[in-house]
Amino acid sequence: MQETQGKYTREEILSQPYSWVETLSFLKKDWGNKLPVLQDYDQVIITGCGSTYYLSIWAARFLQNTLGIPCRSLPGSELWYSGESWTNPYQRTLLISVSRSGKTTETLHALDLFIRSKKGDALAITCYADSPLARMAPAAIVTSSGMEHSIAQTRSFTNMMWPIILMGTRNISDEQIKLVGHSAQTLLDHYQENAFEIGNNPVLERFFFLGNGPQYGLAQEVMLKMKEMSLSYSEAFHFLEFRHGPMSMVNENSLIVGFTDPHSLNFEMPVFHDMKKLGGRTLGVGNLNHGAKELDFSFSWEKDIPQILSYPLYLPLIQLIAYERSISKGLNPDKPENLTAVVEL
């Protein structure tokens, strides 16, 4: 049974290093001089639903940190129902609509409403060139290497991150593209057994995902992956906010996963220490250097990869833990309970 259940999900998780190289090579060739210049706008709104809403939370913080342009993230439904509250007719706005399938009803309605309001420019990011979203948007970046068979987004999510990163960096060299692919493959090769061990540990029943800044949106996404694939109790918080109440849930059955950042590691490591005192197990992800020794587990990559290019690296191994936990519970991660690949109203 385990040889067939989850086949697509596993393949899609493990194929990410190769697919990222494909996507980055495509973006450099076809979009190098066509990506929008965000400094031309007064504000950027990024929208999506479910996983792509969490992607928009990461993207808004990433772009604002990188470029200094006011950026906000909204669920497609919020923009659809109350778009007037978020768009100012005297501001030049760029709307970025993100959807794996390009068929999600709320995202389509939000884009249609924005286009008809004539309050700025619109761009779509999707994995399917023939989708309604790609056809509706004045411009669409299609990361076809992210296409998936499975319902839970894994490869599609990280591939759709790369156009956002390119908007922030404006350029990525061939050497950097190779470095990204090599670093991702090395990470999977080095820590895949640890992901198997953690995912198959029956003691772990509660999963907490922590992140600051852009990483908070990524923490929310893996929280969703753990719920979707394995029907496990999981929540996401900012690092220091976790002390303000949520840590009351930590016990010996808890795993605290932190998406660390080199610039805030001195604030993040004490949170790990406090959770270990409460009996929780700790897993740090990022460019950890010496900090890894103080954790129960760590997924750490080479320090020569720039932080601005590292964000997709946070996800594959945590996706793999969710996959392994799903399999260990006799579930099928390719077909999560009560879910479909597209929500159409």
Image (cartoon, helix red, strand yellow):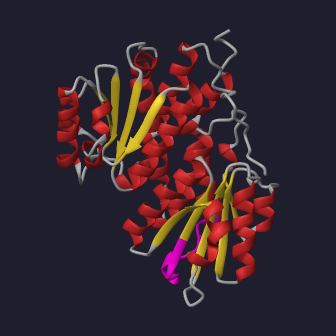
User: Is 35 contained in the magenta span?
Assistant: yes
Q: In the rendering, at what x and y percent does residue 253 appear?
A: 34, 20
Q: Is residue 172 above or below residue 64?
A: above
Which residue occupies 25% across, 49% down? 262
Q: Residue at x 40, y 50 (%)?
A: 216
- Is residue 113 magenta-colored? no
Q: Nearer the viewer, residue 294 or 103?
A: 103
Q: Residue at 60%, 13% (x, y): give it.
A: 330
Residue 11 visible in rendering: yes
Most extreme residue toward the top is 1
Task: Identify which residue is drawn at 45% across, 20% down.
Answer: 199
Q: Nearer the viewer, residue 243 or 101?
A: 243
318 vs 94, left or right, is left
Splitting the image into 4 quarters, where does residue 329 fall? Answer: top right
Q: Is residue 147 left or right of residue 268?
A: right
- Give how far across and how far down residue 224 sits, in percent: 53, 38
Q: Which of the image's four quarters has the N terminus?
A: top right
Looking at the rendering, the stretch of residues picked out in magenta corresponds to 31-44
Outermost residue toward the bottom?
90
Q: Is residue 81 above or below residue 272?
A: below
Q: Is there any visible trace of residue 169 in the rendered image?
A: no
- Tally of numbered discs: 0
Q: Position of residue 185 (x, y in %)?
A: 47, 33
